[in-house]
């Protein structure tokens, strides 16, 4: 909602030239792909969170397919370019961000230090939840072989996991799953982008 | 054993300080260092998140095949490690004890002769379940590693800072007229305050002295009870009382009491 409102504001800026902007763009044909691409880029830039094609389509009042078409063009343009920015698909939407290779300079400017990393215990717990969701605390214990109450609290505090209802079994334990924040924090389009857990088999067996 | 570092009291640790030299488990190097607080010692046992972690570590140290674990050897190492934890006076977490029990059970089952009548397929390796759990655990450790490296890359990527909008900062969503209106409100409030101040004005000492002088001069004799009754506040009463004392001190008035506990009157002292 908020994004739409903000986006709408930005949209007004975009089409400032045409005073009666709304009436002009209601006719879907009147917007060229090139223009739509520029508008989409502007919206992605102002959006606080990854913005999805539907939101863009709703704001510009065009067909969603048209948005998706120009977005894929836009992504490849960014990939080809040698700019400092990347346009990437993340957590079900699109986002403009700096390229990781310039992090040193960006950090120097922002005077920011790399933020606190998760502990090993928290990461392991998060891995179990990510691959086995929705999963209950006893199930996590079974895989990790150790209780992880503080890790689960940390993950909840950092909004990386969310409660996903209760399992209809003895004691009705709470089930947990990963959140949208998890996708954003780990740079994932969606959960299917996670490497398959079976791919880790080779690593696991490789003790000899 | 959520945390591999524990702090223990110094007393039981005194005999434990020799432990590292006498006990070495599969190359694990526990360390004991005095904490900042001199009464406490910090004991580090290594990065073991739990019994499965410890087992994996021991298997690596012994360089044995995970699919063909020498249960007797690993169980011995495992128990030695638990012993070390006890000698260091650490509370051994229940999870570790459960695993110890399972290992010992496994060890005894390995010693039992196989059923001679069972076919090749029917013979199940008693270690299978443990191996599967270890493999599963190791997979998730690898997955955790993967998440760690993803997070590291992601920490090098920055998005733009938040844009200020009416929604996330409603305080700036005002125009010139809003400002004017607020300013007028402040002015109005200020006026009210001034009016209040006038109401609360207090009688000063000088005024009170004048009032007493005038009363004495016009009436010739003033009953102090009446004079004090005029006071409208506690402070005014105090001022009135002080002014009586002051005029007596200046010899402008004299006080007279005609009978014990009777009323006191003030008269002007004739000028000399």
Image: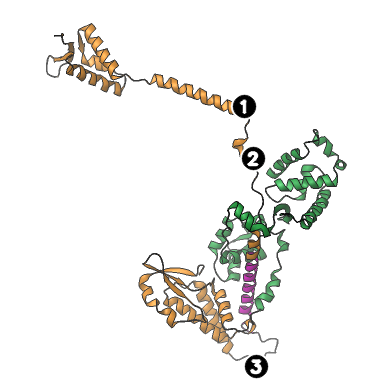
> Which color was chain A given?
green
- Local secondary structure at mark 2: loop
Whole-Å distance between the Cαs marked 2 and 3?
78 Å
1 and 3 marks in contact (CB < 8 Å): no
Q: Position of residue B110 (x, y in %)?
A: 58, 87
Quadrant assignment for the C terminus of chain B: top left
Mark 2 neighbour class, 10 Å CA radius: few under 14, some 14 to 19, many 20 or more: few
Mark 1 neighbour class, 10 Å CA radius: few under 14, some 14 to 19, many 20 or more: few
Judge left or right: residue B26 versus residue B204.
Answer: right
Q: Which residue reaches farthest right?
A: A29
Tell me which label, 2 or 1, sits earlier in the chain.
2
- Local secondary structure at mark 3: loop
Whole-Å distance between the Cαs marked 1 and 3?
98 Å
Name the residue at 41% across, 22% down: B197
Q: Position of residue A132 (x, y in %)?
A: 66, 65
Chain letter of the residue carrying label 3 = B
Judge left or right: residue B57 versus residue B218.
Answer: right
Name the residue at 50% across, 81% down: B25
Residue linked to disc 1 = B177
Which portion, as a residue range, is magenta? B124-147
Q: Are marks 2 and 1 on the same chain?
A: yes
Residue linked to disc 3 = B116
Disc number placed over residue B167 in the picture, else none: 2
Q: Residue B201's image quarter?
A: top left
> Which color was chain B given?
orange
Q: Examine the structure image and report whether residue B215 is included in the region drawn in magenta.
A: no
Task: Nearest to the eye among marks 2 and 3: give it.
Answer: 2
Mark 3 neighbour class, 10 Å CA radius: few under 14, some 14 to 19, many 20 or more: few
Tell me which label, 1 or 3, sits earlier in the chain.
3
């Amino acid at each position: 909602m908020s994004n739409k409102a903000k986006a709408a504001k930005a949209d007004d800026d975009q089409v400032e030239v045409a005073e009666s902007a709304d009436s002009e763009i209601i006719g879907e044909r009147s917007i060229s792909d090139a223009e739509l691409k520029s508008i989409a880029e502007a919206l992605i830039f102002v959006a606080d969170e990854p913005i999805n094609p539907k939101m863009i389509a709703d704001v510009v009042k065009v067909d969603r397919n048209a948005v998706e078409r120009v977005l894929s063009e836009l992504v490849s343009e960014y990939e080809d370019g040698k700019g400092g920015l990347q346009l990437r698909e993340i957590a079900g939407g699109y986002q403009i961000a700096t390229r990781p290779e310039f992090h040193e300079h960006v950090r120097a400017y922002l005077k920011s230090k790399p933020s606190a990393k998760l502990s090993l215990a928290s990461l392991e717990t998060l891995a179990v939840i990510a691959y086995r969701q929705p999963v209950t605390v006893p199930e996590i214990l079974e895989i990790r072989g150790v209780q992880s109450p503080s890790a689960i609290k940390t993950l909840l505090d950092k909004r990386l996991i969310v409660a996903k209802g209760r399992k209809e079994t003895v004691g009705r334990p709470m089930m947990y799953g990963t959140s949208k924040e998890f996708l954003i924090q780990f740079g994932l389009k969606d959960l299917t982008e996670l490497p398959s857990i079976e791919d880790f088999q080779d690593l696991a067996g490789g003790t000899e | 054993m959520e945390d591999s570092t524990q702090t223990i009291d110094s007393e039981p640790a005194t005999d434990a300080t020799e432990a590292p030299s006498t006990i070495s488990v599969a190359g694990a190097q526990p360390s004991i260092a005095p904490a900042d607080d001199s009464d406490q010692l910090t004991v580090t046992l290594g990065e073991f998140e739990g019994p499965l972690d410890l087992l994996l570590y021991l298997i690596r140290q012994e360089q044995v095949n995970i699919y063909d674990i020498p249960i007797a050897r690993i169980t011995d190492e495992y128990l030695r490690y638990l012993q070390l934890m006890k000698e260091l006076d650490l509370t051994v977490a229940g999870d570790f004890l459960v695993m110890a029990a399972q290992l010992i059970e496994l060890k005894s089952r390995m010693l039992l002769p196989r059923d001679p009548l069972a076919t090749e397929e029917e013979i199940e390796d008693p270690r299978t379940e443990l191996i599967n759990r270890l493999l599963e655990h190791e997979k998730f450790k690898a997955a955790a590693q993967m998440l760690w490296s993803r997070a590291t890359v992601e920490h090098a990527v920055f998005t733009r800072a938040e844009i200020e909008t009416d929604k996330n900062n409603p305080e700036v969503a005002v125009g010139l007229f809003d400002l004017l209106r607020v300013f007028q409100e402040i002015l109005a409030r200020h006026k009210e305050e001034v009016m209040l101040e006038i109401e609360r004005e207090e009688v000063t000492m000088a005024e009170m002295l004048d009032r007493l002088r005038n009363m004495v001069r016009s009436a010739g004799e003033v009953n102090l009870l009446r004079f004090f009754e005029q006071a409208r506040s506690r402070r005014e009463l105090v001022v009135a009382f002080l002014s009586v004392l002051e005029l007596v001190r200046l010899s402008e008035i004299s006080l007279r009491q005609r009978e014990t506990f009777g009323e006191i009157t003030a008269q002007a002292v004739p000028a000399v």
